[in-house]
Amino acid sequence: MQKVFLLLAASILSLCVFAETIDKDSLNTFKLQEVEVISVRANTKTPVAYSDMNKREIESFNFGQDIPFLLTLTPSVIATSDAGTGIGYTGFRIRGTDANRINVTANGIPLNDSESHGVFWVNMPDFASSLQNLQVQRGVGTSTNGAGAFGASINMKTEDIPTSSYGEWDGSYGSFNTAKMTFKLGTGILNKHWAFDGRLSSITSDGFIDRATADLKSYFVQGAYFNENTLLKFITFGGKEKTYHAWDGVPDYILSDILLAGNRRYNPCGYMGDDANGNPLYYKNQTDNYRQTNYQLSLLQIINPRLNLNVSLHYTQGAGYYEEYKLNRSLKEYGLTIENEEGIVKKSDLVRRKYLDNDFGGLIFSLNYTQSKWNVSFGGGGNYYDGNHFGKVIWVKEELGNANQEYYRSKGKKTDINFYLKGNYQLTKNLNLYGDLQYRFIDYQIQGQNDTWDWINETMQKLDIHEKFPFFNPKVGLSYRINPENTAYGSFAIAHREPNRNNYTDAGFNETPQPERLRDYELGYKYNRRIVSAGVNLYYMQYKDQLVLNGKTNEIGEPLTSNVPDSYRAGIEFLLGFQISKCLKWNGNLTLSRNKIRNYQEYLSVYQGENWDLEETQVVEQYKQTDISFSPHAIANSLLSFQKDAFSAALQSVYVGKQYLDNTRNSDRQINDYLVHNLRLGYTFRWKGVRECSLQLLINNFFNKEYESNGWVAGYYYRNEDGSLTLHADKSYFPQAGTNVLASINLKF
């Protein structure tokens, strides 16, 4: 397969060399500001629902929080933060779809992890400071590179090459000792053909949740050579993070404990037991440690006024571990045998590390042709992933002699190839036809040992998985320009998604997760004038074999995911904007939806006796037309902004309806709805040779709303002495910070 990649790269690069021999007088003048991977972007003629954010909008709300919190300015987005501040481990959902089903690219290059399918924003701190713009496509969207888009796709474009030299310093400080420091420097154009710029960033925070500290470092560097028709650009960016665990959430009984006054900052991670006075002790190094480095080498060649070519080579290297203190664990699960004077020690406290060391690289390309009625792109790419998973016990309370012992190791390999052909054709003056065909092939292997002990076979769980998936993803649509102010569109798309690593490793011995399929129907209308803009989009997303948690356990007691045969998401998205006056503007959006599983089975374990022994049988509960977890019926955003000379202000309001923690629609297992307001104030001026000086103040959660944005639940039964069953549910939530403040100063030279 690697030979195929090399041949493909050689063929495309040969075409680039040939293009240089064309008469340059017949070529368009090259403009740096227009360089981007347009083949994965939607435009006004593309019949999909999308939102754009430009550089100014990104800068206005960039105080160091991760990109998921910037995305809340767009429709149907929910953001959450483990630490409660938007810094550290963060996540998001779009239309109720979790992040590992959302395709994310930077300059058209895939960022989703090949095995988990998610994007770990903590490994890319302050990436927003190096963005030119981004686009969020809701639904299947247009064909792109990397992971399948099962709810949305996000395409980010990094900053343009600077045409003039500059320097920029940005500093922020606020609640929870949150501090951000960013320094940027650009050369401008050198010797008519060269340009360079870069960024260094540091973000630190104590977090709202106890001990949820974050120490994040990152950089971004790019250099380019260009002439009238050619741009060759090299980009490298990376991050290094150390965060204290806040992954477990706050148990519901802690949140509601009257004596504790509802301790919203409680963090159970790292608990080591109590000291002699009954005070809890916590492990100081209960941390996640990871370093990720990305490299991109891109070539844009204008072949003639109608034809251009984009080619990019990319490589990402990541390595790190997380460290945990584990209380009273069975030593057999870690392959440890320890004896003392009393005999064999079966259980002990210990410290373990779980490591990940991976490499990801490949090539993407697009050939773009524009003619009076045609706009066509042929593109695709090939990517290869190689990841090592392994774990070590670095300390045992009973005996230090077994320290640094490896107890599992596995390797994941994945080849991902895709080709697409898509285009717009102007059927009439006002009617446009869109077509998009994509073929995607995945070859995925996992070999070795899982991190779980197999109590039946008395060994670590064996992994021997080799799956191949050929997917065909067609898309078609129409857009009709009624007049310069009014446009209507409709589209239909099919998408497929392969199971991720956890779907395999958590499956039962006799179960194999199946790939998912989505049929996406979109119908929309847009109205746009200088004073008023509006839009409405209806969607129906029908899933086959969607993978959801089912409460069932396998032979070694682990929770499983299983394919749900029939489920759907249906909704309507409203967008409205008013230019109220020259200085005052309002934008808002509202999503109303139904998210249902037509027939769902929940498997609940049964425990009995004083030791809560697990029974062999499980209780099966049946549900019809039940709600999909973490899918609120209503999401709304409002942004009221004011700009008068050097002063600016903006009030953002976010409403999220109630969500269920699982698929049972049980009111005792839900996240309550919430309405949160964030206020931003800014003043920009010139000062003593500084080209621009900006002072900004961000007050998050202005009215100090107590709310939770995420959580988890585990349901089970206990068998009483009379044989009856009592339902129990362990629940934890992720509270977000109350009123908190960030102040910043930005200097541009």
Image (cartoon, grey):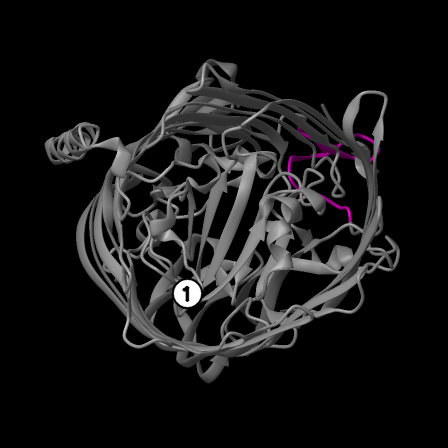
Could you tell me which quadrant the N terminus lies in?
top left
Q: Quadrant of the C terminus?
A: top right
Q: Does the magenta portion include 374? A: no
Could you say where residue 528 lies in the image, as x and y percent from the top left? 58, 72
Q: Is residue 732 above or below residue 293?
A: below
* Circle 1 residue: 548
* x, y percent for residue 522: 41, 76
Going 54% across and 75% down the picture, which residue do you hit? 485
Please state if 317 lies on the left or on the right of 214 as rendered: left
SS of the residue under disc 1: strand
Q: Quadrant of residue 424?
A: bottom left
Give the amino acid at mark 1: Val
Q: Nearer the viewer, residue 307 or 161?
A: 307
Q: Is residue 179 left or right of residue 283?
A: right
Is residue 292 visible to us here?
no
Q: Whole-percent x and y of residue 162?
A: 54, 28
Determine if the magenta segment contains residue 269. yes
Of residues 140 and 570, the one nearer the viewer is: 140
Dot 1 crowding, Cα within 10 Å, few <14, some 14–19, many 20+? some
Please give the name of the residue rendered at 43% of the width and 74% of the height, measured from the top-left corner: 619
The number of numbered badges drawn on the structure is 1
Bounds of the magenta segment: 265-283
